[in-house]
Image (cartoon, rainbow, N blue to C red):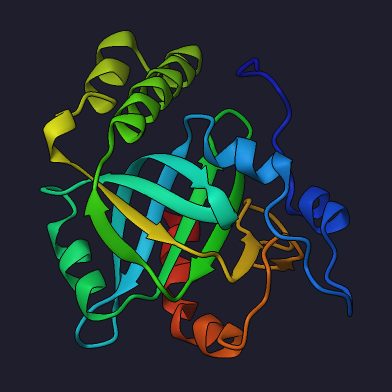
Amino acid sequence: MSRLDPPFTPEQDIAAYPLSGSADPGLTADVVALCQAGVSIIFGVRGPDGAPIAGLGLACRITAGDRVRALVLRRPNEEALQALMRDSRIAATFTRVPDHRSIQLKGSDAVMGAATPEDLRAASRQARAYRDALIDLEMGDNYSIAYCSYDPSDLVAVEFTPLQAFTQTPGPGAGTRLAIAPAGAADAATHDAHAGADHDSHNA
């Protein structure tokens, strides 16, 4: 993808995945590919006082049953991970840097675990892809390499089942819910609880 490609718009995802009275189809191949392509990942959780806490992800894997497995560094995300141990609700936003397409997934059952060998391979591959995207955008080789460098021993996995999906691509319509994640009984509560996390993820 060229750095000169036109920016993505919220309307494109809204048109592709409109909400309807029927059940949502779950994560589509298009969204799965986006999340695993080597993109910017920002996640939001609730602190002890209810205020949102943002963290940065390194990579992502979508596993069986549409489980989202975000790979994050423990030390720079210590506050967010500690908050997640108290409250398992999470909002994660995946942004493709060259055209700013952003999809946010929300869940209420996030758990943290050790990174597996497959996780480590995915993190290495996606970090390289993200680095190359930054270089293609003329962010500079040294900056791009440093930004995407990490200690594999510090990686942990945050896994959750997505209950809702939203477009967070900048522009009119950002924040609109999309029909690409199965809806559950916790929909309304999850949406309200993460209203602040939505704002932080969209503006980070």
Which quadrant of the figure has residue 145? top left
Q: Where, quadrant-wise, is the N terminus in this rendering?
A: top right
Q: Position of residue 200 (x, y in %)?
A: 41, 64
Which residue is the extreme one toward the front?
64
Q: Position of residue 82 (x, y in %)?
A: 15, 68
Query: Residue, x 29% and y 25% (percent of image)?
Result: 148
Q: Position of residue 106 (x, y in %)?
A: 51, 68
Q: Is residue 59 above or below residue 52?
A: above
Left or right: where 170 falls relative to 113: right
Q: Position of residue 139 (x, y in %)?
A: 39, 19
Q: Is residue 100 visible?
A: no
Q: Is residue 28 above or below residue 38?
A: below
Left or right: where 77 falls relative to 190: left
From the viewer's side, name the closer residue of 131 and 135: 131
Number of numbered discs present?
Answer: 0
From the viewer's side, name the closer residue of 56 and 199: 56
Left or right: where 41 falls relative to 84: right
Q: Is residue 133 above or below residue 73?
A: above
Left or right: where 107 falls relative to 79: right
Q: Is residue 204 visible?
A: yes
Query: Residue, x 40% and y 21% (percent of image)?
Result: 125
Which quadrant of the figure has residue 129? top left
Query: Residue, x 54% and y 41% (percent of image)?
Result: 35
From the viewer's side, name the closer residue of 8 and 69: 69
Query: Residue, x 65% and y 15% (percent of image)?
Result: 2
From the viewer's side, name the closer residue of 6 and 159: 159
